[in-house]
Amino acid sequence: MLDTKPLLIAREFPDLYRDQLQILQVNLGYLCNLSCTHCHVNAGPKRKELMDLATIDLVIEVLQKRQVQTLDLTGGAPELNPHFRYLVSEARKLGVEVIDRCNLTVLNEPGQEDLAQFLADHQVNVVASLPCYTQDNVDAQRGKGVFGGSIDALLKLNALGYGIEGSGLSLTLVYNPGGAFLPPSQEKLKQDYKARLWDDFNIQFNELFTITNMPISRFGSMLLSKDQFEDYMQLLLDNYQPQNLDTVMCRTTVSVDYQGQLFDCDFNQMLHMPALNAAHEPRHLQDLLADDFYGADIQVAGHCYGCTAGQGSSCGGAL
């Protein structure tokens, strides 16, 4: 796979500094039942990297010590980590909001038949990837049959109350562009999704997040192979909006990899750009027990223009 990191670190980006820690985003491993073309973590069925129980216990300790508001679980398919349900249960006992970044089809996997019910029982917020409301576009990005499996999973979630107003069970869908272009208006696309999914399948959901494709990992390699990397970077630069610097997710979120290493965001994690202490040494989850890193430097490079272009982009959608 072609590596875009040397091209990205050669580009300057404005300095950024940490604010109060609010969200701990934990990557439970790169194992996934899918291999999507836009996946920035190169997840797939053959990946073996999974967070172990000792590190998960340390996550729980950090949640309590730092009084973190939100635990954001990602992967791979985070649900395929054998300790996923233990971590969710313990975090909810602490009163922490839990987000499960779900690819939907994992709800249909053998051994996961009761997963949707587990999520509902623990009032986990489901943030589900559905890059389009049409079969052709979804299957092109994520694999043949994925759209049908995603619809089945959404119907299962709706039946439990997810996405239904007043249920208290939040269902958010996530759109990623299918190519080297920026997402359209998040609010406009949300209305399109709501209309199409209701008309075609009687599916409901609460919110839609639009997330810009980052020029890293699998997507970045595709850009290089098609000689589109520089054009895409120019698109991000041309649409740079400095006001988005105030609300980028790296200011209030710490990203944790499956080994407990810390990063300023999930994208830096994939670029192997760790969060650094004052001695320029990589930080570890253990360090959060002593310090919340308020005011610390954030590691930046050219891919950061992806979060600040146009309407902005974060794991919480448009900025």
Image (cartoon, rainbow, N blue to C red):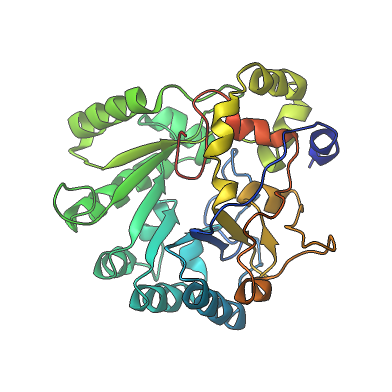
Q: Is residue 276 left or right of residue 38?
A: right
Which residue lies most toward the left here?
Answer: 166
Does 170 sit above or below residue 115?
A: above
Q: Is residue 82 left or right of residue 9?
A: left
State the residue in front, 32 or 65.
65
Residue 252: x percent and y percent?
54, 52
* Image quadrant where one finds the N terminus: top right
Whether residue 211 appears in this view of the structure is: yes
Residue 203: x percent and y percent?
22, 40
Whether residue 213 appears in this view of the structure is: no
- State the residue at coordinates (34%, 78%): 93
- State the residue at coordinates (39%, 48%): 128
State the residue in front, 261 or 177.
261
Q: Is residue 34 left or right of residue 115?
A: right
Does 211 sit above or below residue 66?
A: above
Does 236 sit above or below residue 78?
A: above
Which residue lies most toward the front here?
Answer: 295
- State the residue at coordinates (55%, 31%): 244
> Toward which corner of the image does residue 194 lie, by quadrant?
top left
Residue 106: x percent and y percent?
42, 58
State the residue in front, 238 or 13.
13
